[in-house]
Amino acid sequence: MEEIWKRDEIDSPCVNICVIHETAGICIGCYRTRFEIAGWSRMTSVERANVTEALPERSGLLRQKRRGGRKARRGSE
């Protein structure tokens, strides 16, 4: 493989589930903001590393308690 194709860059965290959560303002697939997604190709390796490091914490912004289910349909038992 030629050296030109070997880059020391952080890969995009995109998982091809590209939907921005309405209230959280982050992608439900990779947890990046619209601005981070749009600017990814222009970011330095340090900037990409900083974004990537912050992503696991953001997943909690999308977690919600499940509502409904069998007990909710039948009333409390």
Image (cartoon, rainbow, N blue to C red):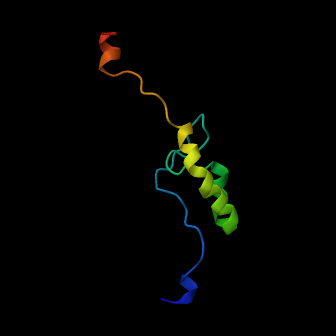
User: Quick one: 3 or 41, which is closer to the camera?
Assistant: 3
> Height in image: 58 above or below 69?
below
> Height in image: 54 above or below 6?
above
Q: Position of residue 19 (x, y in %)?
A: 52, 45
User: Quick one: 23 or 68, which is closer to the camera?
Assistant: 68
Give the residue at x 42% y 27%. 66
Give the residue at x 49% y 31%. 64
Task: Classify residue 16 as left or right of residue 45.
Answer: left
Task: Classify residue 41 as left or right of residue 75.
Answer: right
> Which picture quadrant has residue 6?
bottom right
> Height in image: 62 above or below 14?
above
Q: Is residue 37 visible?
A: no
Name of the residue lying farthest toward the bottom: 2
Q: Position of residue 21 (x, y in %)?
A: 55, 39
Task: Classify residue 19 as left or right of residue 48.
Answer: left
How many numbered circles does the render carry?
0
User: Quick one: 1 or 76, which is closer to the camera?
Assistant: 76
Give the residue at x 57% y 86%. 4
Q: Position of residue 63 (x, y in %)?
A: 50, 35
User: Which quarter shows the C terminus?
Assistant: top left
Q: Is residue 18 visible?
A: yes
Give the residue at x 55% y 62%. 12
Q: Position of residue 56 (x, y in %)?
A: 55, 49
User: Quick one: 19 or 50, which is closer to the camera?
Assistant: 50
> Height in image: 52 above or below 25?
below
